[in-house]
Image (cartoon, helix red, strand yellow):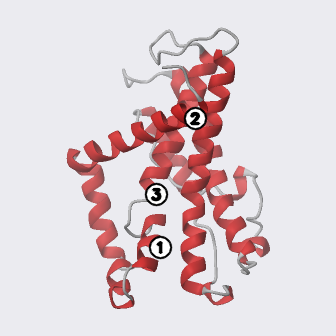
Amino acid sequence: MNQQFDIKQFLIFIPIVLISIAIHEFAHCWTTDRLGDDTPRREGRLTLNPLAHLDPLGTLMIAITAYYGIGFGWGKSSPFNPYNFRHPARDRMLTAVAGPISNLLQVLAWASIGLLIQSFGYHAGWTGDTPLPLLICWYGMLINASLAVFNLLPVYPLDGHHILSYFVPPSMRPIVDNPAWGIVFLLLVFNTPILSNILSPMIDAVVTASQYTVGWPS
């Protein structure tokens, strides 16, 4: 038995991360549809139903790694056909950025809910005695901030690679779009503390900025 396993933490984490990923993928699909490609609509992905966006293996990985306090996984990639876009390069980038934006909006939403809860007398310290409603809000902020920051990394197959590919000179796009670089980079992320030490402060900054934006008491 994993001595670090916390059943309450697990039961809070799993539904929030699954819903957050579903909204992230829906944002991709909705943007793709609005930009002229009906592929997500034809494949039944233009919905907020999490079941339409969850990858079986990715979901299993979320559950297994959440047991060990990590919670890494993925949803189904949002389908698109760049030949259906009116402006293929630009619209591919806009579709990609929609996912992380949806997560940032979810961070703000959870922060707003947390602020409302505090108005009823609950107080947050993010310690072991934090009231359950605020603990749920904290996980909502942390999970979505993590998804936003991680997906903005400019490496294949993350959303950031589509964004970077749009802004670099065309001659560099084959390098940016090369999956090999992304695999090496992701291996570094998960096997060295250097990048994690960079990402963690960025995630904390997103949460703090969201709390400040909604007027969270200091």
Query: Given the image, on which type of amino acid does mark 3 rest?
Result: Asn
Q: Quadrant of residue 193?
A: top left
Between 199 and 157, the one lying in front of the other is 199
Q: Which residue is mark 3?
A: 151
Query: Picture coordinates of residue 52 (x, y %)?
Result: 71, 58
- Examine the rendered structure and indicate whether residue 179 appears above or below residue 88: above
Q: Which residue is mark 2?
A: 140
Between 89 and 129, the one lying in front of the other is 89
Q: Quadrant of residue 171?
A: bottom left
Q: Residue at x 39, y 89 (%)?
A: 170
Query: Given the image, on which type of amino acid does mark 2 rest?
Result: Gly
Between 165 and 19, the one lying in front of the other is 165
SS for dot 2? helix
Q: CA distance from mark 3 to mark 1?
A: 10 Å
SS for dot 3? helix
Q: Residue at x 38, y 25 (%)?
A: 2
Q: CA distance from mark 1 to mark 2?
A: 26 Å
Q: CA distance from mark 2 to mark 3?
A: 16 Å
SS for dot 1? helix
Quadrant the N terminus occupies: top left
Q: Which residue is mark 1?
A: 162
Q: Quadrant of residue 155?
A: bottom left
Circles 1, 2 touching at the beta carbon (< 8 Å):
no
